[in-house]
Amino acid sequence: MSSKGNYAKQLEQLIDDFKVRGEHPRILLHACCAPCSSYCLEYLREYFDITLFYYNPNITMADEYHKRVAEAERLIGEYNRQVEEQDFEGMNSDENARMIELLEGIYNPSDYINAIKGLESCPEGGERCTKCFELRLEESARIAKEKGYDYFTTTLTISPMKDADRLNLIGQKMGEKYGVKFLPSDFKKKNGYKRSIELSHKFGLYRQDFCGCAFSKAEREKQKQEKQLEEQLKQN
């Protein structure tokens, strides 16, 4: 998976085409968490009928999983309130913004554990993450096809730590497998990631500091310990 593309530009072109034709396609937007969803929803809700699909069996800690689901529900509630009241103060949306639905996938951490079996010792960002992306995007494609959505995509491309090329190529592959269109994206572009931080502050969203799995949590704890040790050494 080495080919690269300007996915943000491709998305803009598709949106321009939708506007010309007066279309509002139905899209299943796979969500990793509320903070990452915030900008993606703000941007897409003017052009699509969105269902946010929360499917993350990689979050093997049940309390963490349910906390993130609750934040996604709360964010969608706030966005839908804005539509109902036509109150978009401080938002990059207007009266064209549409209501958003939430669909929670099956939470079965063993699906993730089985998918990454044998890759437990891989470094963060490596092949283990690829298998995780494939698991979540394949289920998103399957559900999108089953329920008749026009497109599916993922909020994962908003993260500076995630490879947009890898995610888009996986999404395209899964779309072809299930016969449903994958919407290209690189949501971090044009200050998308920065905007997600602003929106997280605006709505007081819980911002986790690790991707979700136990491996990413351990890596993050290691980084924090190393930073703490470095600061201690500077003070001595």
Image: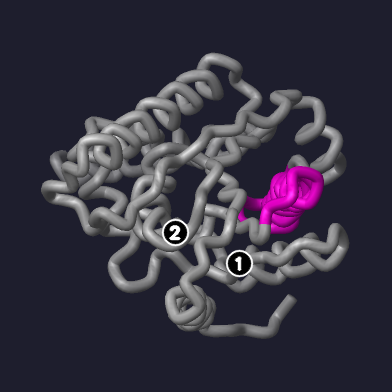
Q: Which residues are magenta?
A: 121-149
Describe the colour scheme in one phrase.
Answer: one colour
Q: Amino acid at mark 2?
A: Ile
N-term mark: 1 or 2 = 2
**In x, y percent, where is residue 218?**
54, 34
**Viewer-nearest of labels 1 and 2?**
1
Q: CA distance from mark 1 to mark 2?
A: 14 Å
CA neighbours of label 2 inside 10 A, class few (<14), some (14 to 19), many (20+): many
Residue highlighted by disc 1 = 183
Quadrant of the rendered image containing residue 65: top right
Residue highlighted by disc 2 = 158
**In x, y percent, where is residue 179?**
83, 63
Asked if residue 128 shows in the view, the reply is: no
Tell me how many marks there are: 2
Q: Secondary structure at mark 2?
A: helix
Residue 124: in magenta span: yes
Residue 101: in magenta span: no
Residue depicted at 64% across the width and 63% down the height: 167
Residue depicted at 36% across the width and 46% down the height: 38
Quadrant of the rendered image containing residue 227: top left
**In x, y percent, where is residue 77?**
35, 29
**Left or right placement of residue 228 versus residue 87 in this view:** right
Farthest top residue? 63
Q: Amino acid at mark 1?
A: Leu
Residue depicted at 21% across the width and 36% down the height: 85
- Observer-nearest residue: 26 or 127? 26
- Observer-nearest residue: 222 or 234? 222
CA neighbours of label 1 inside 10 A, class few (<14), some (14 to 19), many (20+): many
